[in-house]
Image (tube, helix red, strand yellow):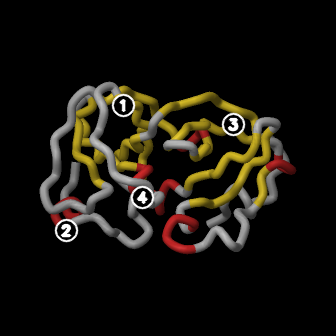
């Protein structure tokens, strides 16, 4: 699977930029179904700590993922009206809980580079590329890995459930 960093891109990519604490992150806008404020959620007992709960969105169950916790930041309660970036991962909908959605930027092919090799470890595996902007760097999130899909880290009941 080609990532944004390794693909030979001839065109610009629109990137949704969001913040998790002081980390500027982003993802390809084509991966985003919508951005929604979460007002209430249902906790999932015995789920991994990064799974903050479930919400019903127009008849579809959406798993809420705490991006900050996945990146090794301290877990915090889900705040009222927290923004969630809704995307499809496999055959499921996932909501990435973030602190703030900033903007959509246009990333030119020459501005998208592979993440530095020293960005390894648990947190580094969640980044597929880095975008250089006028204002700094934006770490592009790998949606499969941040959602836990690459190792199928979900609890068995969530893995086996079908919508």
User: Residue 156 got which mark?
Assistant: 2
Choose mark 1 or mark 2, whichever is in front: 1
Q: Earlier in the sequence, mark 3 or mark 2?
A: 3
- Of labels 4 and 2, earlier in sequence is 4
SS at mark 2 in the image:
helix
Return the mark for residue 82. Answer: 1
Q: Nearer the viewer, mark 3 or mark 4?
A: 4
Compare marks 3 and 1 and give the one earlier in the sequence: 3
Rendered image quadrant of residue 127: bottom right
Q: Is residue 154 above or below residue 55?
A: below
Confirm or deny contact between disc 3 and disc 4 (CB under 8 A): no
Closer to the N terminus: mark 1 or mark 2?
A: 1
Residue at label 4? 70
Q: Which of the numbered marks, if any, corresponds to residue 14?
A: 3
Nearest the camera: 11 or 138? 138
Q: Residues within 10 Å of mark 4 (few under 14, many from 20)?
A: many
Residue 117 placed where, x, y %?
Answer: 71, 73
* Number of numbered markers: 4
Q: Secondary structure at mark 1?
A: strand
Sequence-first disc among 3 and 4: 3
């Amino acid at each position: 699977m080609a990532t944004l960093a390794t693909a030979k891109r001839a065109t610009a990519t629109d990137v949704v930029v969001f913040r998790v604490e002081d980390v500027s992150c982003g993802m390809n806008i084509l991966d985003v179904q919508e951005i929604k404020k979460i007002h209430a959620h249902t906790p999932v007992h015995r789920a991994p700590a990064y799974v903050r709960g479930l919400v019903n969105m127009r008849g579809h169950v959406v798993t809420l993922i705490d991006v900050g916790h996945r990146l090794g930041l301290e877990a915090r309660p889900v705040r009222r009206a927290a923004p969630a970036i809704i995307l499809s991962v496999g055959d499921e909908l996932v909501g990435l809980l973030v602190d703030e959605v900033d903007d959509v930027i246009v990333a030119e092919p020459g501005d998208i580079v592979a993440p530095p090799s020293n960005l390894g470890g648990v947190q580094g595996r969640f980044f597929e590329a880095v975008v250089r902007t006028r204002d700094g760097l934006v770490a592009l999130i790998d949606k499969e890995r941040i959602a836990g899909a690459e190792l199928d880290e979900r609890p068995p009941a969530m893995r086996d459930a079908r919508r």
